[in-house]
Amino acid sequence: MLAASCLQATNAMRESDFNFDWKFKLLDGIPANLEVPLDDADWRDIRLPHDWSVEASFDENLEGCTGYLPGGVAWYQKHFPSPDDSEQSNTYILFDGVYNNAKFWVNGKYLGENPYGYSPVFFDLSEHLTTDGSDNIISVYVDHSRYADSRWYTGSGIYRNVKLVTVDKLHIPIWGTFVTTPEIGDDKAIVQLETTVENKRSKKSKFSLATRIVAPCGKVVAETNDEYDLGSGKDRVYTQSLVVKDPMKWDLDSPNMYQAVTTISERGNVIDEYVTSFGIRTIEFDKDTGFFLNGRNTYVKGVCIHHDGGLVGAAVPEGVWRRRLEILKKAGVNAIRTSHNPFSAEFMDLCDEMGFLVQNEIFDEMDNPKDKRWNMNEERSKDYITRGYHEHFQEWAHSDLKRTMLRDRNHPSVFQWSIGNEIEWTYPHYKYISGHWDPEVKNYWNRIPHLTPEEMEARYAETPEREYVLTETAQRLANWVRELDTTRPVTSNLIIPVASHATGYSDTLDIVGFSYQTNQYDWSKKNYPQMHHTGNENTGSWHDWDAIVEDPMVFSMYMWTGIDYLGEANEKWPQKGWDGDMLDFAAFKKQGWNYWKSVWVDEPHISLGTLPVEGSEYKVDDLSGKPILKGNKVPLWRNTNMHWNYKEGEMILVEVCSNQPEVELFLNGRSLGVRSLAHAPDRILRWAVPFEAGTLHAKAVSKGQPVCAIIETASDPVSIRLTADKSELSADGYDVAHVIAQLLDEDGNVVKTEDARLTFEVDGEVTILGVDNGSNRSVQDYQANELVTSQGRGMILIQSKRTNGAAVVKATANGMNGSSVRIEIN
């Protein structure tokens, strides 16, 4: 990576942080005929990114589809001086994301709008800035009164970063470069850079366009310089090719990042400098043999995630994403599907840096609306608050897709473009075409079709004409993608793939992504052998993974979901969100994290989970004493308890996740027998054990060394253990620390079956962002300094200010010994 100080210096020529010193006003209704700018003297002082919805209390009377939190209407304003050389320069404001239906002004001059809450947008301020030394005022109106306009939590407000970009009138525009690597070998790589130059001067300009390639070590490894001229009011794309010798490839375990530093110079003076981060890597998709990264056959071990970060809502600090991605990486996750919309630029940068593949998804709605409360097509709920993006799709889809791709197409992590998610639900005739909903069919889920492809095509041919044809819409979107980038395939997530095959929807795609219907892989491969099929959304079961192992064509699974997310909880109060597979709202590990680590990571792993046999899907076999499944159910991992606290004699199902061939279980030193992975079809080893207080110990041996997992019976909690994931924060106003409180008994054992109300006291140069216990059924306020623990634990998130010093965080509870941690801020 180029040295941080060097990058900051070059970026400072163009970009400045525009997140601080904003004013905010949440309104009671929708204002009309307001004169902009507004008087903001009594408005609240805030900094961005900002999500006002997550600041509110959860309310059962609101909508579960968006997490029982409100929307509303609000104004943001910021006062700022004109750049010193504003008459000789162009100034732009770049918003990475505003949710939603946003309108923008500067000094009362209307700049434009951006209805989609997930696409980045920028505006040219140059003609409207003051020249008399007075301040300018940016005004942003956000209308999220349709607060149930999605099937998940969206957040409200300017919830991503804002930058002010000031450049010479002869400059490289925002997102003005595109780096490709048409040839890559072990000894050299060809780096091709397409650079757009704009001339907004009043006359023709002659200039030098130079690019140098900086290696991860900071060394310049290639450079070129060309002379050009460009007429007034013109823009042009210039292509430069450079050779990088002995390239360091971007890969999952070695995510090497290069920098292309491009300068525009006149008479030896640099007037613009643009830094493009990129990676050198090859991707290849083969319908018979799968996916290859840098020539190596690679399984995509993916998770779907939404864009919220628990207690911070949609305004997620970089450090919150970093912690979550680090934890997922340790379990073997190597790919993220951005469900179901573009994520922040910061998130994409992290995936580059940390070595994650990204399926970059753009739309959840297209021509027709989805039912926000009940999913599928909109049949049951049609009211104002559920009006969503489909109302803007016809006018804005091309612009939103283009702006997203221009921002993201230089990221080596991005290896697929997904144009949509389960769009077939909004075309009800697709259900009829598939035959899965015919009266004689009892369950459409994962079912092999009883109709032939020809019969489905005949059904499609007899359906009446409609205003919108999904195949035509998908083809249009796919064409737009390919106009901007042909180096990555186009995919989509198909919930009724057999119907999509018959209608031609699948033909518009390079990779046909299945949403769950794994049993239809072989049928689809047999009937549509020209297509490449794989998984884009999965339950997260062994069956999904086995489909990859058994069929070279299928290279990916993305479990739904890697992390708990707010929303999609209609009529489930107090459940506020969806239960993910690996991490909860506070990014505490679930058993799914242990399970998939045992499958996806080669290093020795073993973990313990427990739950009562009564009420589970298992019973105890009278002859063997072993747990067996009831009926014809399929064995699956579950989020079992991570404790050993039950009633004496109660029959407990013990589940061990491990990648070791054999595991022996002990209770208070007595062996309870050995189980073998060879006899575990779902890779989970199970025992039925009458509860006895003490120590439960699972043991295996790897290369002569013991691999163990131990849980012990805990007594009543008497103290709090407080730990932080960082001992030092940068005094930049952005850095965060997760401070975690865990209840302990008198012997220091973790207590997971008792809870307490904790109070956090924070002193020092930090801001409290909120508290959380990770539970999906906790509707305690996030914006607080106290909480009731869940599983004996809770967390407070703090963020640095821009002042050096220190912060001390204390946690107390009635009748317990408190604890504190100190964090330095420099």
Image (tube, rainbow, N blue to C red):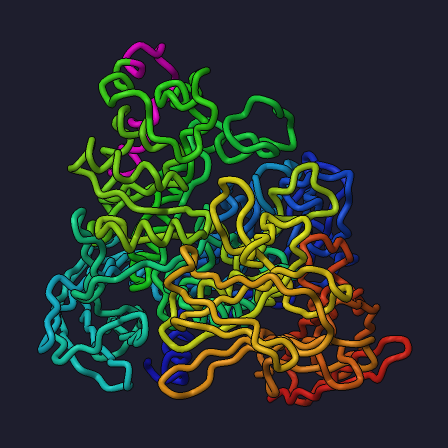
Left or right for 498, reference 266: right
Name the residue located 39 percent from the left edge and 48 percent from the top edge: 361
Q: Is residue 387 above or below residue 609?
A: above
Taking the magenta stretch, the answer to whether it contains residue 465 is yes
Q: Is residue 584 visible?
A: yes
**Which residue is more in the foreground, 380 or 399?**
380
**Quarter of the figure that contains the N terminus:** bottom left
Residue 664, horizontal then vertical, whole percent: 50, 74
Name the residue located 66 percent from the left edge and 87 percent from the top edge: 823
Residue 22, horizontal then vertical, whole percent: 65, 62
**Which residue is more in the foreground, 461 or 238?**
461
Image-quadrant location for residue 689:
bottom right
**Which residue is more in the foreground, 580 or 640?**
640
Name the residue located 19 percent from the left edge and 69 percent from the top edge: 209
Residue 171, horizontal then vertical, whole percent: 30, 63
Q: Which residue of the protein is positioned furthest toward the front in this rendering?
A: 623
Taking the magenta stretch, the answer to whether it contains residue 677 is no
Q: Which span of residues is magenta-colored? A: 459-479
Q: Is residue 49 visible?
A: no
Residue 692, horizontal then vertical, whole percent: 72, 71
Q: Is residue 734 above or below residue 298?
A: below
**Quarter of the figure that contains the C terminus:** bottom right
Left or right for 44, reference 496: right
Magenta: main secondary structure equals helix
